[in-house]
Image: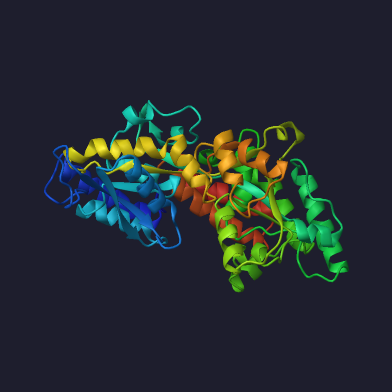
Amino acid sequence: MKRSILTGVATLAAATLALTACSGGDTGGSDTGTGGGSETSEGGGGPVTISLAGWSLSTTPEFQLLADAFNEANPDVTVELKEYDATEYDTQMIADLAAGSAPDMYIQKNLKNFFTYQDGGQLLDVSDVAGELSDDLAGLDAYEVDGATYAVPYRQDAWYLYYDVDLFEQAGVPVPTEAITWEEYDALAVELTEKLAAAGSDAKGTYQHSWQSTVQGFATAQADGADLLSGEWDYFVPYYERAVALQTEGAQENLGAITTNSLTYQSQFGTQKSAMMLMGSWYVATLLAQQESGEANEFAWGIAPSPQLTEDTLETPVTFADPTGIGVNPAIADDKVDAAKEFLAFIGSEDAAVALAEIGITPAIANDTVADAFFAVEGAPGDDLSRTAFSNRDVRPENPVSADTAALQNILSDAHTAILAGGTAPEAAITEAMARAKSEVLN
């Protein structure tokens, strides 16, 4: 039964990418119009058009922003976007790579699927680009395999603790001014819930969305000796015990209510149904846009570092998130390779990081120049703790690069649901998950 529970994406990838790699051989240099070559390329030292995958282009401006900014600095190179469905991105991309119709460059949307692309021979070695990038660029090592680099990150998200200043004031509770521990976070969530109720509000103290990341991501990043690939997951138990306690005390929506009522994290925090929320940095841009459009309420807010397991890491808080990078389709035409690599060098630069920060996106470089641009955005918080959360953090990957990652994450997803919606005790659910990992994946 080993590796018998690969996800649909991974299963499709194992078949189609392996077949493509075998049949395509050394396909670099093809200029036949199939396999990544854009028909609009003129090559020969003149204007070049290279294509880039993206999704939800009308609501995800980062792709067009990077394309336009690069074109402004390189007038002879046009980056043409090809839109994919956000929820089916990897499935569609794998199919296009197998069919030879994928764009010249494509996003590594989820790090857990990076192994599928790299191992399937569908990413060009871009170590020469990586070797020239700034040491300030975070997340680059996530794309290294056996000493070679196969993608360049342009954003490095991180999980924060968002807080609603207005609801804190309504409850008469001081807003956080420094990083806190999980024990302090739990107590704060309960206190806020009780005092908001006393003040006539039905808002809860905090909100943790339905994703397993909201518990497991922190545990894997923070617990001593944590190793997701080992299948030894006892370190998840205390994190789940805290999450269950918050549900029981009414300080956090339970998972059953979240899924039954299709609650979204944007509505829970953006319409002030919770005073705090654990969420990734990508929500900053969304919240700014929704407050501007009226989809979210007008209120003051800030970001604090994620809560910590112990006081030992309060000075440089440990959090988690995967980088988002761009790789090159190895079937790209020879006369476009240089342009594609120049584009990768650009997305890993401070110039690109500043451009992304100016629309509220957390780039892969977070130095003072980038932070100044990020917090100059209209509507962004201006307090010192928010700036600290942005610039001073130890971000660890959620998904290790391995053939087993997706299968193990599926087992852990079942445990997550069993604990928070099914009423199974954390220790029992995690023990069962470890047994499944050994019998179905790691044996």
Q: Nearer the viewer, residue 127 or 224?
A: 127
Image quarter of the C terminus: top left
Give percent across and percent down for residue 336. 21, 40
Residue 440 in view of the camera: no
Q: Is residue 216 above or below residue 147?
A: below
- Seen at 51% across and 36% down, the residue is 365
Image-based side of 27 in relation to 255, left or right: left
Image-based side of 93 in relation to 162, left or right: left
Image-based side of 364 in relation to 205, left or right: left
Q: Nearer the viewer, residue 32 or 361?
A: 361
Q: Is residue 285 above or below residue 229?
A: below
- Seen at 44% across and 34% down, the residue is 140
Give percent across and percent down for residue 250. 77, 64
- Seen at 21% across and 49% down, the residue is 36
What is the residue that sits farthest to the left in this orientation?
A: 32
Give percent across and percent down for residue 184. 80, 46
Q: Is residue 253 above or below residue 218?
A: below
Residue 251 in view of the camera: yes
